Amino acid sequence: MFDLDRWREIFQSINKNRLRSVMSGFTVAFAILLFTLLFGIANGLGNFFKGAFVDTAENSIFVRVRQTSKPYKGLQTGRKIQLKNKDYEYISETYKNKIEYQSAIIYKNFSIKYKNEANTYSVTAVNPDYQFLEKTIVTEGRFLNKRDIKQKSKSIVIGRLIKQDLFGERPAVGKRVNMNGSSYLVIGVFSDEGGDNEERKAYIPVSTAQMMYGNNDYISQINLGYDRNLNTDAAIAFGNQMERDLRKKLSIHPDDQTALSIRNMAEANKFISTVMFALLLIITFIGSGTLIAGIIGISNIMIFVIKERTKEFGIRKALGAQPASIVGMVVQESVLITTIAGYVGLTLGTYLLSLIGDSLEEDYFITNPSVSPEIVIGATIVLVLSGLIAGYVPAKRAANIKPIEALRAY
Amino acid sequence: MIKIEDLHKSYPIGKDSLHVLKGIDLHIKEGEFVSIMGSSGSGKSTLLNIVGLLDGHDEGNYYLNGQLIKELNEKKAALLRNKFLGFVFQSFNLIAYKTAIENVALPLYYKGMARKERLTVALDYLDKVGLKDWANHLPNELSGGQKQRVAIARALVTKPKVVLADEPTGALDSVTSDSVMDLLKDINDEGMTVFVITHEEEVAAQTKRIVRLKDGVITSDELTKVAKVV
């Protein structure tokens, strides 16, 4: 029902009582603004935590070895531990049904040359599964496959930035590059969300690296992806089990943390989910706190406004205004003000968050602070409704007192 | 037009109650110009508030335009006030943020008249009280006499059966008082019932019938010279 006259009355009342209107609007706008900012910043913290692990699969387990730091079973401190192919096979055999992906890794640094362009890059020798463990995104050609491993082929997959360095805009796939004196065929180009360093890497088959550079079966590191069907606790248990088994197999003291380290993302995931849960609690607390403060603010103002207008209502009633028309007028006015103010607070808050952007990422661990529109609109609706109730209750009371009493009010 | 039988009204004051009107019988016919005289505390304002449906009564019967007023809710009261009654208050009671013409047009808004029409009608009535040129001024830009004339225009704009004036000259000097009373006389001459409450003899003397009230009862009820002349 659109009543132009009613709207005219309301606009006049808002316009002629600007301080009052601005004050009640300000309360709501400020509450929504705070709500948006706090909620956005809390979300930004959450985004940071999630984003810290975005470029590796969240089910990764890293197995690394170094020198021993404790004597064990007659073996001396300082003994160099070396992972070999048989360790790799032992893991894949023993935990077959708990592993989704597995890759051996050898880290190298080589100069790669194409025509007149040359540069030194970190070259990682891996198995095909590495693509999924590192969340490598193949943009052209393909990644390494089983045949490359078996045939020890001289194939290479280069990062987006290597391609840019060596090939510029020209196509790279199918071309041959010279790496450390041998010719390799570029079979693919990849990008990675982990940043520039990740895109200045090249991948070659692990078997090729073993044959070409040392002619041994050494492995620098083993990365695993545990079965995603395992829950966090089972995944942690799996990691611990594997650690015990490997210590036994490699004759490493159970407490020797330097000789063998197994980093299990399941543990990090558990930590993250704990942090996220705490963050959610804080967000809920902050959000509802701000809203309640806003609701109390708007209620107080409405009570004051209606007290101030009691005499006006008395006059209107003496002239023939029915209680419903007075209540309707007050409620409509309050809803109009809270809606507009809520929108202003929302827009301002979202704008400020977009200004903040990622500028706080390094110092305050806040990444892309933002709020979903549903939540802010929901919050605004809550405030509008409370403005409605906050207006309705006292207005109803004011409209039902006898006009003679209302006229006596000052 | 107004018929009151054995009307009682008390106000609770703490645990006690103050018996203000103690059995009023009053009959005002259409077209009369009546003043209720009495000192403060005599119950005259209470009587006007009851007649004006701004307040309820405890005992007795009150007929407005032949209709028994009983257990009226605010909605019906508002309807009757809008239809039959026009008010003129001592303190004018204009809405401060509305211009003269908007104040006059307000009762017509509650009657449901379209905006254009009610502004035309309101301007007519402002013209009648001599304030056409002041139509777009706010109340605080008007003198006391002008405000009261705006209030009278507002009371008349719905063509009510009865105009109720509560100390209409109470806040005015004698010259403006006279102009306001002249206006009320004109209204009465046009056939409208006018019901004035005052404690000033001079004001009462300009009406046609004086009802004197003391301590909640009517002590005298007589026609004035003005009435006898006519």
Image (spheres, rainbow, N blue to C red):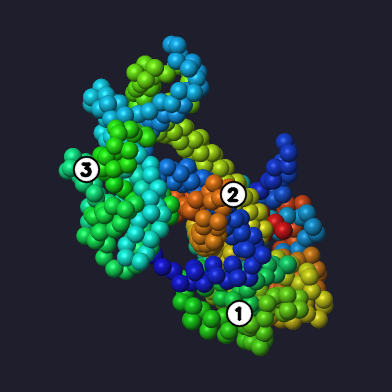
Q: Position of residue A269 (x, y in %)?
A: 41, 34
Give the residue displayed 29% in from the left and 37% down from the top: A215
Query: Could you tell me which secondary element the residue under label 3 belongs to?
Result: loop
How many dots with numbers? 3
**Both on one chain, marks 3 and 1?**
no
Q: CA distance from mark 2 to mark 1?
A: 63 Å
Which chain letter goes with mark 2?
A
Q: Amino acid at mark 2?
A: Asp
Eye-nearest disc, 2 or 1: 2
**Both on one chain, marks 2 and 3?**
yes
Give the residue displayed 49% in from the left and 69% down from the top: A7
Eye-nearest disc, 2 or 3: 3
**Both on one chain, marks 2 and 1?**
no
Q: Quadrant of residue A124?
A: top left
Q: From this viewpoint, which residue is outermost toward the top? A: A73
Q: Position of residue B123 (x, y in %)?
A: 58, 84
**Residue in the foreground of this view, choosing between A109 and A370:** A109
Query: Could you tell me which secondary element the residue under label 2 belongs to?
Result: helix
Q: From this viewpoint, which residue is outermost toward the right? A: B174
Q: Amino acid at mark 3?
A: Lys
Residue picked out by circle 1: B101
Residue picked out by circle 2: A363
Q: Position of residue B17 (x, y in %)?
A: 71, 41
Q: Quadrant of residue A219?
A: top left
Q: Earlier in the sequence, mark 2 or mark 3?
A: 3
Determine whether label 2 and label 3 are within 8 Å by CB. no
**Residue in the foreground of this view, choosing between A229 and A304:** A229
- Mark drawn on residue A152: 3
Determine whether label 2 and label 1 are within 8 Å by CB. no
Q: CA distance from mark 2 to mark 3?
A: 46 Å
